[in-house]
Image: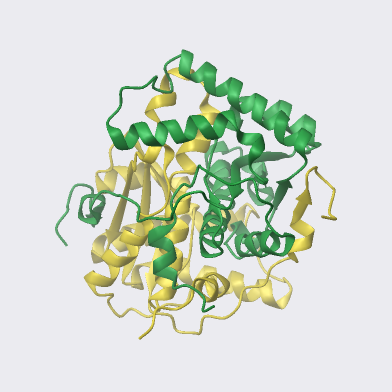
Chain colours: A yellow, B green
Amino acid sequence: MAEPGVFEVIYSTRAMRRLKPDPIPEETLKKIVDAGTRAPSGGNTQEWAFILVRDPDLKRFLRDYYWNTWQQLRAKRMIPAGNLPPAQQRMLNAAADLAAHLDEVPVILLACAHQEYTPLAAMNNPRANTIVIHGSIFPAVQNILLACRALGIGATLTTIHCFFEEALKQKLGIPDTMEVAAMIPMGYPQGKFGPVTRRPVEEVIHWDRWGQQKG
Amino acid sequence: MAEPGVFEVIYSTRAMRRLKPDPIPEETLKKIVDAGTRAPSGGNTQEWAFILVRDPDLKRFLRDYYWNTWQQLRAKRMIPAGNLPPAQQRMLNAAADLAAHLDEVPVILLACAHQEYTPLAAMNNPRANTIVIHGSIFPAVQNILLACRALGIGATLTTIHCFFEEALKQKLGIPDTMEVAAMIPMGYPQGKFGPVTRRPVEEVIHWDRWGQQKG
């Protein structure tokens, strides 16, 4: 099978939340993470780690925390209760189903980054540090999402683990020096990869200065 | 010309720092940003903006701040003065040359993100907010780097603007509610796109738990 084109993949990589429980071959998982590691990192330090959780007990642990957090966020109205426009309602329903059944996906990938970018550590500029750290892990995350898509694996970038990160790190033995930047449930999709809907590019491009939308 | 394959592009997208001054067609720039907007964002809110700086005076402004910051970081030894292993020394030299001549590239792209993810704003959890915000802009940045590569444009992800972000925002009229996550100089490359060197994937994969490196 020929390799799919890069724009074809970029334009059809979308959050896939309804996933089959079928296992993903180890070679496929390695290929996905390897694509992740081709992304840039500050000073090419590559201070990242990718945990692939397949163990049923650990997946249940992640599901329980994730689902509890989901319910708390909904109780506090940080997540809408319903009555959304149809497309958003479908997205919310799929996200809620994923949260409730997270342990049924075959693999949950955790993308981890060092909390400190060593060359900046002495500068006492937490904002610069955070930008370098996140700018050194989320590009890898996007490569991972694209590689999943290219290989027919559904995936979605989630960040709700932030609310239980300490418990998560303790359970999986993740060192204090690392942070978990993203949690990505992965599996063969139940539905189809379709095009994503986005605002027209003219609305988000500014030429030279903010607000100048003619080139 | 057939579209290049997604893995071919992922594996040959590297920081290109020696760039020609030749202009990049507007349609190419739009195609690159459009690829960026296909990336995911928290709740698909797409609260991003991409400023394409081509104006010579504004590029000189960026160059002056960037180069001054570079020299300060070097004086404080946050950037090494030299005497590095050959590959790292070449990277450092190219980065220093880019800093000194930043105004000579045809386009400098600024990737901007909202500082606050509205659904989380009331939660007083700055860490969760930052993860969502950066997880909603750096995937777009990676799509932009891949699209540049696919279209034969050299680019590199830089973050040194963090040290003069306020001056930058004021000069370009960027609202207080936005942050500048990345600065990407772009241009046709003087050299060739080659493969990137990375640690073996086995070193960065952990199975189920931290430190468990056998699948």
User: Residue at 48% across / 47% down in the picture?
Assistant: B16
Q: Position of B194 compared to B188: left or right?
A: left
User: Residue at 60% across / 41% down in the picture?
Assistant: B181
| Number of numbered callouts drawn | 0
- Considering the image in quadrants, where does the C terminus of chain A appear? bottom right
Q: Position of residue A97 (x, y in %)?
A: 49, 72
Residue at the outermost top position? B75
Residue at the outermost left position? B214
Quadrant of residue A143 within the rendered picture = bottom left
Residue B131 visible? The answer is yes
Question: In the figure, A179 relative to A62: above or below?
Answer: above
Q: Position of A37 compared to B45: left or right?
A: left
Q: Position of residue A192 (x, y in %)?
A: 51, 84
Quadrant of residue B172 within the rendered picture = top right
Q: Nearer the viewer, residue B129 or B177?
A: B177
User: Residue at 81% across / 36% down in the picture?
Assistant: B173
Residue B164 visible? The answer is no
